[in-house]
Amino acid sequence: MFNIYKGKKIFISGASGFKGTWLTSMLLELGATVKGYSNSTSFTHFEKINNNFEHEKEEINDQDKLHLSLQKFKPDLVIHMAAKSIVRESYFKPVLTYKTNVMGTVNMLEACRHIESICGLILVTTDKVFKNKEQDEGYKENSELGGFDPYSNSKACCELIADCYRDSFYHFKDYGKTHNVLLATVRSGNTISGGDFGQDRIVPDIVNAINTNSKLILRNPNSIRPFLFVLDTLSGYLQVGEKLLEGINCCGDAWNFGPDKDNEISVINLVNYFTRLWKSVLIEVHESNLHETNILKLDSSLARAVLKWKPLYNIDKTIEKTIEWYREFHENNNVITYKQIKEYLDALRTIKG
């Protein structure tokens, strides 16, 4: 499983972020040569894990430096994760959100056009790219795009930009003739696990309330989200990358990665899982006047059918592993990222063979 990554050169923008740190660690464990590219390294998980790999601290909007970095590294696969990713923050910083998410994506696509070594390019967007209709059924890859808030809308723009570049420069019919790049976009459910220290994110908020014996402030306790363990999310991304590296051009498209039905739960139910398995907290509800989606579900039947992907962890295992990470970190100053990655990969190999 994922043997193709051994010895491959993978370029990751946003490598110091929450998912970026996990993805970098997972690829290093698989034997890949990784180069990271981020505008900051001041993230607790990234700083503590001390991964030994090349990393440049640069802005995604500096196109010349980005192009030079790619040109020197000569990657086989590029995974673009750099983004302003907090919904509520995007209301207060819309210009920065669009500049980073939209033009950062354009800069990456433009830079990759001129690097001959690249054979696969993955753009990471979000489950929030769809025009939300508060529907109970999950959104499919071809559902109408939209996005109410600046973050969600900017990511929907990235999907349209990917379609444009796929049609204009990376068309399937020209693959192997005028270009050798397969371009895919990936959207995942609400990814959770240890190692997340972001503001205005539910798991860090729960963990902080537990560790400081403070009140947990919830804005929308009854909102339903498709919660997915970080390594289930990343295994989906890597399965797409695997197909791109193999040159399977039908995989250069959009992919959804969502959890099983049992993991589509309300925010308050997520909190209840944590308090049952760890420690109780006092809760206060402070309703926000900023719009946030009430029901969000993702249909990942395409990935399950074509890639044979499915989540390895149910909601109980997801929360158990998340708590395990944070307790080791806060109580023993121990980062168990690689331990959890090895356990996950071993379990995945047992199932996949």
Image (cartoon, grey):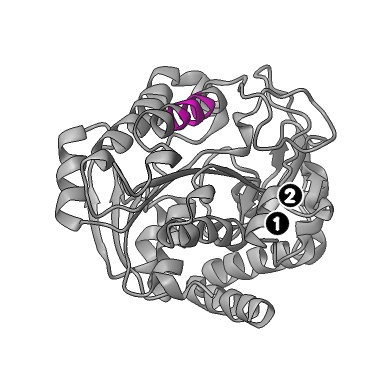
Q: What residue is shown at x 39% (from left), y 41% (from top)?
A: 82
Secondary structure type for disc 2: helix
Q: Is residue 214 above or below residue 105?
A: below
Asked where in the image residue 131 lies, by quadrant, the reply is: top right
- As shown in the figure, which amino acid type bears the numbered disc 1? Arg
Near mark 1 (Cα within 10 A), the count class, few <14, some 14-19 or many ≥20, is some
Q: Which mark is residue 325?
A: none
Q: Which residue is mark 2?
A: 301
Q: What is the C-alpha distance between the residues marked 2 and 1?
A: 5 Å
| Residue 334 in view here | no
The foreground one among 244 and 339 is 244
- As shown in the figure, which amino acid type bears the numbered disc 2? Ser
The foreground one among 288 and 217 is 288
Asked where in the image residue 162 lies, by quadrant, the reply is: top left
Query: Is 116 positioned to the left or the right of 297 in the image?
Result: left
Quadrant including the N terminus: bottom right
Q: Which mark is residue 304?
A: 1
Quadrant including the C terminus: bottom right
Q: What residue is shown at x 83% (from left), y 48% (from top)?
A: 269
Task: State which region is magenta.
Answer: 154-163
Q: Is residue 131 above or below residue 55?
A: above
Q: What residue is shown at x 74% (from left), y 67% (from top)?
A: 317
Q: Position of residue 213 (x, y in %)?
A: 67, 53
Q: Position of residue 242 (x, y in %)?
A: 47, 62
Residue 161 on the magenta segment: yes
Query: Is 192 positioned to the left or the right of 22 in the image?
Result: right
Query: Is 306 positioned to the left or the right of 235 in the image?
Result: right
Query: Is 319 positioned to the left or the right of 99 in the image?
Result: right
